Image (tube, coloured by chain):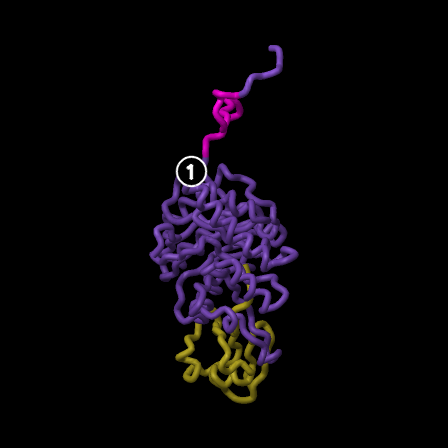
């Protein structure tokens, strides 16, 4: 069991997952997003290879209207 | 390239009006207002994705494609240099390496006045990291010069507080800034109506950035078009060079000779 904080909310996963799987879980596949893991950017090219670990803190962002 | 283009970080823009994309009632209104403004550079914000909510909801980038507009991601809502830097690194990843950004680090949520100490700290990190930084700041000419020296590509002083619509409260400071910096000076925040934008341009500012003045108008699309005309008119007036102000020494516009005989006795 691993616990991962996504945008401030803790989610439990019963097996290790990579970033791509997490994005699918969040129903964000094919959406324009950017992802930060523990304060560092995860480039899109590494979504398949980066495995998430217990205690990771993720920020997943999109573009919204703003001034 | 037009002879009077706005040049930021080596790139030419024919519009001197930059607009935000916040506070509109829906995407259709956003799109119509931005179209009417004629703006080429438009600001966007970076926010947490709502997990699992409306996965089919359209994205801002679908209606305002980076192929059509120069998107300027901002750091609105950031109160520290660190948060601003992280936000813009996320923005760069989101926009496929796009490096032109708007840095703003705020002081407090009541005034949204810029925290220049944190702004300077963030600007140093971002410039070193390869970002082209357009920076929102106070109208302090010394700070403006420091931000230019750090390597910011445009200095964007406030006219008055963000969202206040109070207009240009200190035109003298804007002039002091323009005398001191070589990069474009773009008034950012505080414009309330078209005449405010025209005044900014008449002062010699290189552009105006606004959001609320358009989005919070009763008819945003009409105000967007008014702002476009105001920026154009103000720029032309600046280039034309206004007449000097004279309190007295009246100078009639019509000939003084050949006036018909007066019936007045004296």
Horizontal relation, residue B206 to residue B77: left or right: left
User: Where does the C terminus of chain B fall, quadrant-wise?
Assistant: top right
Prevailing secondary structure of the magenta residues: loop
Find numbered disc 1 in the image and state the secondary structure of the residue it sits on.
loop
User: Chain A, which colour?
Assistant: yellow
Q: Does residue B247 show up magenta in the picture? A: yes
- Residue at the far right: name it: B218
Q: Write down the region rendered in magenta.
A: B243-259
User: Chain B, which colour?
Assistant: purple
Horizontal relation, residue A10 to residue B124: left or right: right
- Against B125, residue A28 (above or below) is below
Q: Which residue is mark 1?
A: B241
Q: In the image, residue B172 lies at what x, y percent? A: 49, 37
User: Where does the N terminus of chain B fall, quadrant-wise?
Assistant: bottom left
- Residue at the far bottom: name it: A15
Q: In the image, residue B18 lies at what x, y percent? A: 48, 56
Q: In the image, residue A30 lies at what x, y percent? A: 49, 81
Can the viewer see residue B116 in this picture? no
Q: Which residue is drawn at the image coordinates 48% and 45% (left, top)?
A: B234
């Amino acid at each position: 069991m691993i616990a991962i904080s996504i945008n401030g909310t803790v989610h439990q996963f019963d097996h290790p997952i990579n970033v791509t799987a997490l994005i699918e879980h969040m129903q964000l596949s094919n959406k324009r997003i950017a992802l930060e893991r523990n304060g560092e950017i995860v480039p899109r090219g590494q979504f398949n290879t980066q495995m998430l670990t217990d205690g990771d803190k993720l920020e997943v962002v999109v573009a919204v209207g703003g001034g | 390239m037009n002879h009077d283009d706005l040049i930021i970080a080596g790139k030419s823009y024919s519009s001197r009006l930059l607009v935000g994309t916040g506070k509109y009632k829906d995407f259709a209104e956003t799109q119509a207002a931005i179209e009417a403004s004629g703006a080429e550079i438009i600001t966007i914000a970076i926010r947490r994705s709502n997990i699992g909510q409306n996965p089919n909801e359209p994205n801002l980038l679908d209606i305002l494609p980076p192929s059509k507009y120069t998107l300027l991601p901002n750091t609105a809502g950031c109160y520290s240099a660190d948060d601003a830097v992280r936000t813009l690194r996320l923005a760069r990843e989101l926009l496929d390496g796009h490096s032109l950004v708007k840095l703003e680090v705020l002081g407090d949520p009541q005034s949204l006045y810029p925290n220049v100490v944190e702004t300077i700290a963030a600007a140093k990190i971002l410039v070193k990291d390869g970002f082209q930084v357009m920076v929102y700041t106070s109208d302090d000419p010394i700070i403006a010069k420091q931000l230019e020296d750090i390597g910011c590509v445009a200095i964007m002083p406030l006219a008055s507080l963000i969202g206040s619509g109070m207009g240009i409260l200190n035109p003298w400071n804007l002039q002091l800034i323009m005398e001191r910096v070589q990069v474009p000076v773009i008034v950012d925040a505080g414009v309330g109506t078209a005449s405010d934008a025209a005044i900014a341009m008449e002062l010699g500012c290189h552009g105006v950035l606004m959001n609320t003045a358009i989005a919070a108008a009763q008819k945003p699309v009409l105000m967007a078009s008014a702002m476009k005309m105001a920026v154009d008119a103000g720029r032309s007036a600046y280039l034309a060079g206004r007449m000097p102000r004279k309190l007295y020494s009246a100078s009639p516009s019509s000939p003084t000779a050949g006036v018909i005989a007066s019936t007045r006795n004296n």
